Image: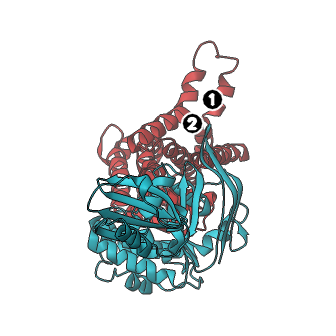
Amino acid sequence: MSIVVNELTKYYGAQSAIDSLSFEIRGGEIVGLLGPNGAGKTTTMKILAGYIEDFQGEAKIAGLNVRQEALAVKRLLGYLPEHNPLYLDMYVREYLEFIRSIFGTNGSGPQVEHIIEETGLSKECHKKIGALSKGYRQRVGLAQALINNPEILILDEPTSGLDPNQLVEIRQLIRRLGEEKTVIFSSHIMQEVQALCDRVIILNKGKIVADERIDQIDRLLHPGTIVVVEFDRDIEPESITVPKLTNVKKLSTGRFQLAFAGKSDQRREVFDYAVSRKIRILEMRQEKSSIEDVFQVLTK
Amino acid sequence: MWAVFRKEINVFFTSLTGFVVIGVFLIVLGLIMWVFPEYSVLNYNYATLEQLFTIAPMVFLFLIPAICMRSFSEERQTGTLEILFTKPLSTWDIILGKYFGAIFLVILSLLPTILYYYTLYQLGSPVGNIDGGEVVGSYIGLFLLSAIFVAIAIFSSVLSRNQIVAFLLAALLCFTIFWGFSFISTIPVFLGSLDEIIQKFGIDYHYRAISQGVVDTRDLLYFVSAICIFLVLTQYLLKLQRK
């Protein structure tokens, strides 16, 4: 089931939270929504989930208009809001049964027991939600989002505030869910996005600054190839002459970042150059720009 | 709507609020009706439930805001309202679920007082010497009055995230709408000219009319419209807050 967003704009007073966002997410994709605080990630998710009704532009989920067919859209969605709000006085099972009862007993969704098992809550389901640790509360939040067996999952920072073990578990769960569902989630953790997503959309100040497949993300910064090399002595950057070299950046004494046009490996050429000039190479590696670099450059 | 209704009832009784509310209501009324000599029916020598219907609105003035103060303010405070609004529920489903949940609790607290009626019926000399029509009218009046109080208290709980503020606002609004207009009408400027019209804006005027055993459609219309006004305002505010 697809999500189509067209010219989505939302103003808070005179300030725009998101400005003419357009993107399309195909069924079965896991898409990460990245951006600094205040970039508009949560606003976008709230609009898609049907919480914010006052916006300009158009958002469609599975062909249904989010504004006009809100109730039908909400039946298809699972949504985990930011900060994972929960009724702390309710028991885990009681809460999940309540959420399920909203969808009506004749819904085709899996039973509460199945969801409890799937989210690893079996041992905790007799406890009050207020008595659970943060990791288990996060599971309860995910469980309520899954209770109607949604085709589309919208998760707003599902892993924030978890310890490393809980993080791994929740990520595994999201990955498993992503095998059959369309998942859109926001995160601050770059490695997480890299590990989980098929595609990443980076927002900054309400606009999309990047929308790329995750394996292509390094292309955004450097369309060519980067080689970092350290020579045994300092030389003038201008004196380096290697075929296809487009730019030389001095990192420290004797250390250079060389940018080349094209995707071919240029380390042999750099080696030949050093030999011809009788310079010794102490270190050389081809570098890929990480998603952090891309994020930092694009959202500066 | 029924999912929210059932949840509200469950929360009332798992958090003990329900038991405390019903307990406090019955203890206060029981003491005043049967124990304190100044008001006690046993010293009054007439088989009447007048005390019940005079005291109950005052008790409800505090109890109903206490029941309803958390209904929206807590959900806004903790963010759970976002969960409800992103499930296939309309705003009216949520408001009416909460409204009828509180009404149900009010009915539960009123039901045991039927025992008072039975007791007085038996105590009457001869047995059964009690004005049944007046009692039925008064019950209807009391129910409608509490239905307005619930609507006001739910409306107040949308106004603030702070439960105490919501409680105080609700109590103040209930007081003003119940007695306030009667007090205003006694200001000398209005006497003889506008005093009756002003009184008609208050609940007191219509409550007393129904308590006499005459269920007039004009009074019914007053109660129903007041409830609708506060619920519509609630819906409007909720919509504003989601912007």
Q: Residue at x 38, y 85 (%)?
A: A117
* Chain coloured red: B
Can you say which quadrant of the picture contains the N terminus of chain A?
bottom right
Q: x, y percentage for residue B96?
A: 59, 58
* Discs 1 and 2 carry the same chain letter: yes
Q: Residue at x 42, y 55 (%)?
A: A239
Q: Earlier in the sequence, mark 1 or mark 2?
A: 1
Label drawn at residue B204: 2
- The relative height of residue A13 versus residue A39 in the rendered view (above or below) is above
Q: Which residue type does callout 1 highlight?
A: Gln
* Foreground pick, B37 / A129: A129
Q: Estimate the x, y position of residue A132 in percent, counting from the top left.
A: 28, 69
Quarter of the rendering containing residue A180: bottom right
Residue A139 visible in the current orientation: yes
Query: Which residue lies under the disc numbered 1?
Result: B199
Q: Which residue shows up at 53% across the image and 73% down it?
A: A263
* Callout 1 touching callout 2 (CB < 8 Å): yes
Residue appearing at x 64%, y 46% in the figure: B236
- Chain name for mark 1: B
Per the model, the C-alpha gap separating discs 1 and 2 is 8 Å
Q: Colour of chain A?
A: cyan
Does A19 appear above or below B184? below
Residue A16 quadrant: top right
